[in-house]
Image (cartoon, helix red, strand yellow):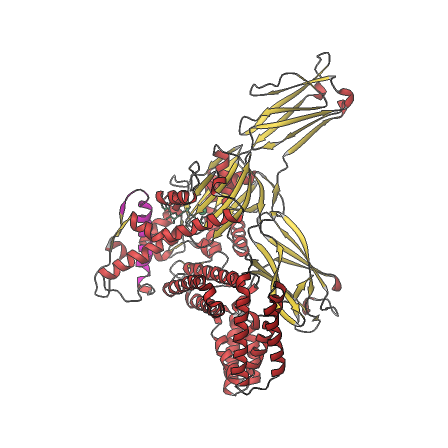
Amino acid sequence: MYIGIDLGTSNSAVSCYHRGQVDVVTMEGGDNILPSVIYMDAQGSKLYGQRAFEQMVLAPENVASGFKRLMGTSTELTLGNGHTMTPEQASSDIVRQLLGQVFKAFPDEQVEGCIVTIPAAFNQMQSEATLRATRDAGIQAVGLLQEPIAASMAAIADGELNTGLFLVYDLGGGTFDVALVQSVGGAVNVLDNLGINMLGGRDFDREILHSLVVPWLKQHFTLPDDFLKGADYQRLLRIARLATERAKIALSRSESETVFVSSDEIGTRDLRGEPVYLDVPVTRQQLRQLIEPQVDETIELCRRILAKNGYQASDVDRVLFIGGPTKTPWLAERVADQLGIVADITVDPMVAVSYGAAIYAESREWGDDGTARKSSRESVEIAEYALRYDFPSRTSRDTARLKISCAATQRDALEVQVDCTQGWTSGRQPLDGNTAIRLPVAQQGENHFRISVFAADGRPLTDASKQIVILRTHASAAGIPATQTISAKVVEMDGNIASNTLEPMVDKGTLLPAEGTKSFRAARDVKSGSNDYIALELYQHAENVNDPEQNLSVGAFRISSSDLLPGMAINKGDEIICQWRMNDSGILRVVIDVPAVGQTFDTGHLYADTDGHRNFADHDGEALLTGLLDEANAELKQADTALGKMARSDIRHIGAAIQEQRRAAERANDPEVRRGISERVRALRQDLSQLVNSPEHRATMLHGRHTDLVRAYDREIEGGNMPRDSERFRRMADSALEELKRGDEQALNDAEQILNDMDATVYDLMTERPEVVVSVFRNLSEKGATAVDAERHARLVKEGQEAVQKNDITGLKGINNQMFNNQAQHQVHAATASEIAGLMRG
Ligand SMILES: Nc1ncnc2c1ncn2[C@@H]1O[C@H](COP(=O)(O)OP(=O)(O)OP(=O)(O)O)[C@@H](O)[C@H]1O
Ligand SMILES: [Mg+2]
């Protein structure tokens, strides 16, 4: 038996492939989906699924839901009475529940393999967390598959069209994915995918809540201004959110609904002692207005994926709708209309993903490190007659080709006939050396054929006769592409000017499993007995955004002097060879080979101690967002000053979006919302960076930076009577200007390097000044939320405060450095500040 699990933000489902047939497993209570919800009572006993969901109104504080959105972070879920769980443990519990139902339905079956689906936009940390959660639930043979691939396998298995180009539009509770999928005879090939990690039905609920329900509450009751954040009203808000979701779903069937909850159920009073209830009318039209911008964002992404791959809407045969929100009638209509592509309605949007995952699980050969495609060719040789039969042992098509080759001497001396147990026969045919017979593969599962061979006189040659089996599969995946480019941070040198950039290691779209070797060189020495180290730092590399700071860090591995054998040293320029392997679940492993010291380092699963350990809850979460938004604003200002009129409308657009995220951050009281905001801000910064780096704007932008730097130098350094080497600075400024005038790509690269150096000079000189050293310290002190080691941070803050009191500026500088190194890398501003990579291109 093979299992396919759709571990969803709102709902989960499980299907089994068993004796050539796929079944969606029924849950307790008869539904075929399990709400991904957990309830825990005071004693620690738990309820799951629908029964937990029902507790949401009675005891919302004891219920956890939506935890998929926090996978791969350190944010804890609170379940009342002091009980907490990690998102991973909660997911593991849901998987255990699903498996329980499977074993109830198929008590005597062995599990050969289990596939769990993930959004295509999941990063390495989220994927690894999902794998661990499933293993913890007791299944070891686990693989991951992207949700859109699973969905298309389901559609192709059951639809009429098994050849064509499809767009899979998957809008779930938490994420949006779109994939462009080609199928040839049931073999699915994903051409490209894009996604928004944080857009789904839950966001629609929130939109209605904030735009309609909260204003209604304020109008009808006396509530404190900040009641959204007040602990006294969290119960009310959770109940309101649930009732809002119910009304939203009901609006898929009716024109108007009411968000209704009685005061008894809510059990909260307002400031004047009035019992609070909800009775908020909502119409389909209002809902539509509220969520149209988000729906249009998804349509935009669909257009982008087509354009990017050189297709037009008319090339696409169908758009498949997956996920609960696509059951909103006007939503699916709007998407199909706007795109001008026919909607496919053959699949059940709630269970197609698990169904496809089960089909995929069966199609794989299960090994120790992930899975591989099952071989589908078979050959039978009959030496005595020099005969060979070649045929597919599995196919997703309804016919298969049997090729019979024989030695020249046998040609025309033999005859063959193929019969199917279901009655079909090929009739007798002479063998001409290269006979091909088309066999009907009429039924799903096993199809049995008998090949009979006859001598020229009609006598059957029993030794040459054979029974063969061809398995008709539902669909197969031709290739699983890597969903993101993973790159290593390297230093780029020009003369003695250094800056960081990214060097791709695994390209997006590479068919998995895949492996390769990437050579780097050490960019600095690592001497034994010192504090030196070099690190392989990996990033999820957004297209055309080459600054590591703008990308998501997904893993880091350090080789420190203490890892080296006694007396060994790595010297600058030594070869650092990275052998990487990404299995078909998208999990990356790297082995680092350093020939100069004769040592090999197995990085295990690379793990970022930055994002992975982020806590989006409470004060930490707030501080994290404030930091990110401040950085985005600073970058925006810089772009605006430099680009001026040229890109004003683009910049205004991005600026407005950043402000919107700031407003959202101010009212956010929930870790999942905060994480959504952090992802959006990163995407906006990437947009900005793409804008600034577009060839037409880059020169202007660099000019702007040049002016700013010269101004800063004049004002702060010259004007501040600082010790300096003005002549060197002027020389740099002049040569940067010359490069800018030349203006070709190489010249602009050179100019940028010089500007980085000028920037560093200004920064270095500035940081000589006591008041700057103190202000840098103050700034860093507030960055506790992004510190890698919180205890170390607290200790350094204390030491720093003492140094300030004693006016020990030199000491304080050292402390600043240590605090700086203790910051999650990409929180720290680029160019001047970020640590220069320890690797360079090989
Ligand atoms: N009939 C309906 N009309 C509109 N929305 C619906 C309907 N049924 C369910 N939903 C919404 O769909 C969402 C859940 O969809 P689904 O179960 O596909 O998500 P999921 O698979 O759990 O999430 P994801 O794939 O993002 O992890 C919820 O926000 C729910 O409110
Ligand atoms: Mg889903």
Point 54% across, 65% down: residue: 698
| Spot occupied by residue 288 in the image (x, y as percentages of width and height) | 33, 49
Q: Is residue 710 left or right of residue 236?
A: right
Residue 338 drawn at (x, y percent): 41, 45
What's the magenta bit mostly, secondary-structure-wise? helix
Comparing 689 with 456, the one in front is 689
Query: In the orientation shown, which residue stands out farthest toward the front?
Result: 741
**Residue 741 seen in the current view:** yes
Based on the picture, tell me whether residue 658 belongs to the magenta stretch.
Answer: no
Q: Quadrant of residue 593?
A: bottom right
How many numbered circles does the render carry? 0
Is residue 241 rendered magenta in the image?
yes
39 to 348, vertically: above or below: below
Q: Nearer the viewer, residue 76 or 709?
A: 709
Image quadrant in which the C terminus is located: bottom right
Q: Please tell me which residue lies in front, 574 or 380.
A: 574
Point out residue 344 in the picture as x, y percentages from the top left corner. Answer: 43, 38
Q: Can residue 552 be seen here?
A: no
Where does the image place residue 142, in percent across and percent down from the top left? Answer: 56, 46
In this rendering, the answer to whether 509 lies above or below 494 is: above
The residue segment tinted magenta is 233-256
Residue at the outermost top position: 457
- The quarter in which the N terminus is drawn is top right
Please tell me which residue is depicted at 60% across the width and 79% down the height of the picture: 730
Is residue 206 left or right of 318 when viewed as pictured?
left
